[in-house]
Amino acid sequence: MTAQETVTVDADARDRVHAVRHRYARRGDRASAGGRAYTVYLVALFGVFFLVPALLAAADSPGPVSVGTPTDATPVACVLAVTACWGAQVAARFWGPLVLQPFVLHVFMSTDLPPTGYLGTIARRRLTYAGTALLLAVCTAAYLTTDLFDHLDTALQGVAAVAGVSALSAVVWLWGQVRTVLDNLALACATGAAGLLVGVTSRTAPDAVGALWLVAVVTAAAAAGLGRAAFRAVPTVDLARLARESARASQAQTYVLTGTLHHALDLYRPEPRGLTSALLRPDGRLRGHLHQGAVRALRTPGRTATAAALLPAGGAALTLGTAGAHGGLAPLLWTAGCVCLYLGSGWVGETWRGLRDELTLAPLLGEWWGGALGRALPWPVAAVTGGALLGGGAAVAARWSLYGGRLPETALLVAGSVVLVLGARFLREMKLHLPLSLLLPVVTPLGDLSGLLILAWQFDGLVAVVIGVAAMNAVPSAPGAAALAVAVAAYCAWAGLRRTGWSRRGLVSRLRRV
């Protein structure tokens, strides 16, 4: 085949792929002009009332976080690159760039087009969109929160480093879907080692050289090499597995659009497997509640490993934030630690899900004192508390001089934050179907804001954590902040029980029996 014939075949395949997608876009379920106009209206509303004022305020005031010199910012850029790459790999295992609409994928698979002809074109476009979005988001966040863009030379270095990280993250997103698990583990280890090496090497370079240029060069070179290898692996993609992933993604998207986000997340929960006999004693009786929770957690090793990493990290960040030793970063560390504990508390096992089902079906399964709550809560409470103590103890041991006589107040704030996190997680896990009342319009001078209520309902646990931490930070005394956290957690627990159908009048009597 000559070069001219190759170009003709490639052009013909590209035109056919474009024709198929164009025909699919003209179906009756495509977005209407009014829907697109409403989306543009929401984006413009956010930009005019939130983004533009924030950018103007950041231009007239110094950044709240000082990065110092580019050499000091290089380790932060390395941590960002490693985190973005690992996150892209994890996201690719669930929703990669090659996931299509099931109908379009079925049409392509039924033709004589090779997988590279339609998957490669779609992947290139989506990687471009993902890299551009990450570049804009990170640059905007850095402009609002740091002083990196106050000077032209540091701004150029920062933009170059962020561009390299964005390109590498987009390529790794494709790599995570088309390569095997062993290849992804090897890439994750190599990314962590390279980030550590670049971060250590940059500390020895003079400031005039511009250490962020090293991050930009390394990430750009890695993106070029990994992108070439990832696109070469596109023809080897298992199309049957891709079809299953596309069908699951389409169902999850339908759930999200209809307001039931927790149902969409349930589609991506791993099925527990193995260790069934470990729940029973040799005489056939069930083991203790803590032992059952630990065994059920080990039946989903991926989620449990993630929780095992998040809980100590959250405990360490929470301890550093509540101590207030890092000035302006203390509230951010406090919030980040609570968010990590919140996420880890949900991934530590499947006991929350069983508790929700058992409370919903309590009349069918029977009620007795110390039943559902006594069986399900000991393991997540012990796991979250133990993880927070482990991370907090490590933080205190590493920086003992920062705490001094504030250790009792720090311990009180950490305990209150852990209680707040557990209450917010209980509120989240007791969620059932979308309340019909949230679909009613909320008319304001800015338009219909009912979508904000739906958004708050979808992420109510996270919203409770963030608002609770902000309220605790505003209270001047540690005992008062801890008492406020306990009150918010108690309200979350009451609201969670109400979601399962428990009436106000019989709530206390049922708690005595269950």
Image (cartoon, rainbow, N blue to C red):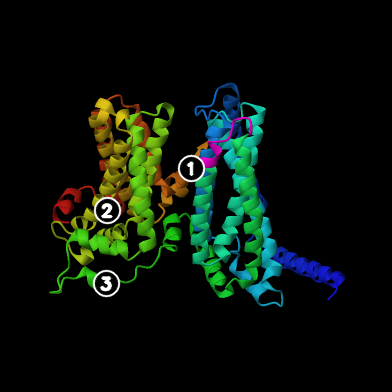
Who comes first in sequence, dot 2 or dot 3? 3
Instruction: Tell me, yes or no, whether the highlighted magenta stretch contains residue 127.
Output: no
Three-letter code, disc 1? Leu
Look at the image and give the residue range highlighted in magenta.
200-209
Q: Is residue 353 left or right of residue 507?
A: right
Q: Which of the 4 image quarters holds residue 375?
A: bottom left
Crowd rating for badge 3 (residues with CA inside 10 Å; few <14, some 14–19, many 20+): few
Q: Is residue 234 left or right of residue 355?
A: right
Which residue lies at the image location 65% right of the left edge and 71% below the top edge? 235
Q: Is residue 119 above or below residue 442?
A: below
Q: CA distance from mark 2 to mark 3?
A: 19 Å
Who comes first in sequence, dot 1 or dot 2? 2
Of the numbered discs in the image, which one, if any, rests on residue 153?
A: none
Which residue lies at the image location 32% right of the left edge and 31% below the top edge? 323
Crowd rating for badge 2 (residues with CA inside 10 Å; few <14, some 14–19, many 20+): many
Three-letter code, disc 2? Pro
Residue, disc 2: 380
Which residue lies at the image location 65% right of the left edge and 57% below the top edge? 225
Residue, disc 1: 452
Residue, disc 3: 276
Which residue lies at the image location 34% right of the left edge and 48% below the top edge? 311
Q: Is residue 268 left or right of residue 410?
A: right
Q: x, y (%) of residue 77?
A: 54, 41
